[in-house]
Image (tube, rainbow, N blue to C red):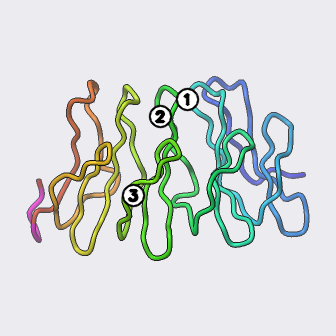
Amino acid sequence: LIPLTLTVSPASRRVAYVVLPGDDRQAVVVDGVRESAYDKVGIPTFSPDGRTVAYAALRRGKWVVVLDGREGTEHDFIGGYAPVFSPDSARLAYGVRRGTGWLVVVDGVEGKQFDEVRTPVFSPDSRSVAYVARHGDSWVVVVDGAEGREYKGIREYSLVFSAGRKRIAYVADRARGQTV
């Protein structure tokens, strides 16, 4: 089997890769052990401590996050195909589509549904999680489930926590041509 992708754990002690085991399916191999085959899989992601691996997988039209070989809840789609681990490796977050809406799942708990969500970001101490979401023409930053001020736009990948988790920063558009 020829690997399609290759992921190495942060300390370079573990390896995971995607293979084509046959019949147009894909499977993830972790440390030489092949896991279940799916119609499609995302790129495997190791936790920062390297002990845990997660990836998105599609079977019969439904997506799941597979965490150490165990499938989670089915969803219509998983955004970005890659779950995000917290810096302490204890938490996991990812965006999913349900019908025409999107929501973020944090530690297995589903958040509020929006028209669009972006990749979640954990604080450096792993206690908080934030993401950008859109309802209609308005964009907000959601921190630990609480929605912030509405903006006309929030720049993708601009969301960052301060080192102490007390502040969060991002680039937002108040109105056409006005950036804060």
Percent from the top left, x then y, of residue 104?
Answer: 44, 54
Residue type pointed to by label 2: Ser
167 shown above or below 65: above
User: Image check: 128 left or right of 178?
Assistant: right
User: Image check: 27 left or right of 64?
Assistant: right
Residue drawn at point x = 23 percent, y = 53 percent: 147
Residue drawn at point x = 10 percent, y = 63 percent: 174
Label 2 and label 3: CA atoms lie apart by 16 Å
Label 1 and label 3: CA atoms lie apart by 21 Å
* Nearest the eye: 4 or 144: 144
Decide whether residue 71 is among the magenta residues.
Answer: no
Give yes or no for contact between labels 2 and 3 (Cβ–Cβ under 8 Å). Answer: no
Give yes or no for contact between labels 2 and 1 (Cβ–Cβ under 8 Å). Answer: yes
Could you classify mark 3 by the number of other residues whose Cα lies within 10 Å: few (under 14), some (14-19), or many (20 or more)? many
Q: Earlier in the sequence, mark 2 or mark 3?
A: 2
170 shown above or below 177: above
- Report the magenta stretch's main SS: strand
Could you classify mark 2 by the number of other residues whose Cα lies within 10 Å: few (under 14), some (14-19), or many (20 or more)? many
Percent from the top left, x then y, of residue 180?
Answer: 11, 53
Judging by the rendered image, the residue that carries numbered circle 3 is 118
Judging by the rendered image, the residue that carries numbered circle 1 is 48
* Nearer mark to the viewer, of 2 and 1: 2
Give yes or no for contact between labels 1 and 3 (Cβ–Cβ under 8 Å). Answer: no
Residue type pointed to by label 3: Arg
Q: Earlier in the sequence, mark 1 or mark 3?
A: 1
SS type, badge 2: loop
What number is the disc on residue 86?
2
Q: Which residues are magenta?
A: 175-179
Q: Earlier in the sequence, mark 2 or mark 1?
A: 1
Could you classify mark 1 by the number of other residues whose Cα lies within 10 Å: few (under 14), some (14-19), or many (20 or more)? some
